[in-house]
Amino acid sequence: MHVLVLGGGVIGVTTAYELLKDGHQVTLVEREQDAASGTSFGNAGMIAPGHAFAWASPRVPRILLRSLWRDDLAFRMGFSADPAFWRWCIRFLGECTAERARINTQRKHRLCTYAQSVLREIVAETGIAFDYSENGLLYLHRSPATFEHGVRNLAILRDLGQEQRVLSAEQLVELDPALAPARDKLAGGVYAPTDATGDCRLFTQRLAAHAQTLGAELRFGTTIRRLLSDGERITGVETDRGTLAADAYVLALGVWSPQLLSGLDKWLPVYPVKGFSLTLPIGGNHVPPSVGAVDEDNLIAYSRLGDRLRVTATAAFAGYDASHRPADFRVMLAKIQDILPGGADYTRPSYWAGLRPMTPEGTPVMGLGRQRNLYFNTGHGHVGWTMSCGAARITRDLIAGRKPAVPLDGMTLH
């Protein structure tokens, strides 16, 4: 079967690779000149089933309200005249109950755990190097109150089998000496030893190159304009370089997926939430972290990726605007220097912002819609890197008519 994969981020490339392993003819279409040039470019680098919480929770509406007059919070709320924005927000608020947060977290964790096992298989099969570290991840708390709440909150993942270790400030420093200067600023933390880090962009680009050696056709620099349909099936994809046709199609375009689907199916509840990242060089005189971490009080994440420190923060509801300026990074730069004062060269930051394709539930949309040959693999939000390989394997199984290893409850359009 000939399958056309629409999108060249980590979701599209892993899907293309999985389909090749099933013997399909695969063509991947991406408007940028290389893989992982959009949302996959500068993410936190974390492969984190140990942090697979749904964003929608009872405390988030209060945070969003406060963000209207404060610029130092992890969430930033903006307003938009876009009807899709308000429709998404209404559904998101409906997910902000304790029960819905529990269900969505369980579903996210199940997919993230499965995806991590598939990633390990791919690493073993291909030998791809991407600054991969399996040193686990730390979830840090600065106050006794947030520490107590964090440990209590993590119980939902522990009950699902997630390995966790509660550590004092002294034990945190023992595990990662880079935290020594911040010992007195930490109340404690939780260590998830099975979590990992790695450079998503490097992985995606190298896997794309490997897929090409296996026979994949990679059409970079090709902009998709619209899907062509006869009502029941997709018959082709119109691009700026002509029309492409295949037997099956995979929609893996992240935040751009709803626009392409418009008029062909019901509303696709995927909306952009802008994230910001800093990449900082590490030199011989620095003391970088050996374990990636999340500063839970400020929702700032950091990972060491070879000779670079990647720092990410902030979820801004800003529509499709991915622009940024140095002032947007002021708070996160100050916070990371506070906890890792010698971690990297903070005078040489590289700034980046990208659009996370969020669903109100925090789980992706997969499977079929009305068009019986169009498969969804989109809406992975802030954990697309974590979920990617598992979502790709599930898509491969669905196209082959096999039952996926993970149930798709709450993760389909219909």
Image (spheres, helix red, strand yellow):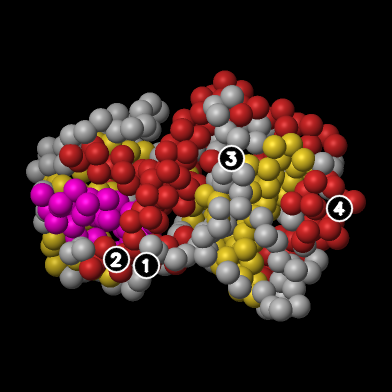
Q: Are marks 1 and 2 in contact (CB under 8 Å)?
A: yes
Residue 114 lies in what quarter of the image? top left
- Determine which of the numbered discs, if any, sits on residue 210 in the image: 2
Whether residue 12 is in magenta: the answer is yes
Which tag, 3 or 2, sits closer to the chain's start? 3
Give the quadrant of the C terminus.
Answer: top left
The residue located at (28%, 72%) in the rendering is 221
Span colored in magenta: 1-30
Q: Which residue is mark 1?
A: 206
Residue 228 location, x and y as percent? 15, 51
Measured Cα–Cα span from mark 4 to mark 2: 44 Å
Looking at the rendered structure, the secondary structure element under dot 4 is: helix
Kind of element beneath mark 2:
helix
What residue is at 21 percent from the left and 33 percent from the top? 402
Residue that mark 4 sits on: 183
Q: Secondary structure at mark 3?
A: helix
- Whole-angstrom CA distance, mark 1 to mark 2, is 6 Å
Q: Dot 1: within a 10 Å radius of its alpha carbon, few (fewer than 14), some, or many (20 or more) residues?
A: some
Going by the numbered disc 2, the residue's amino acid type is His
Q: Are marks 3 and 2 in contact (CB under 8 Å)?
A: no
User: How many neighbours does mark 4 have within 10 angstroms: few (below 14), some (14-19), or many (20 or more)?
Assistant: some
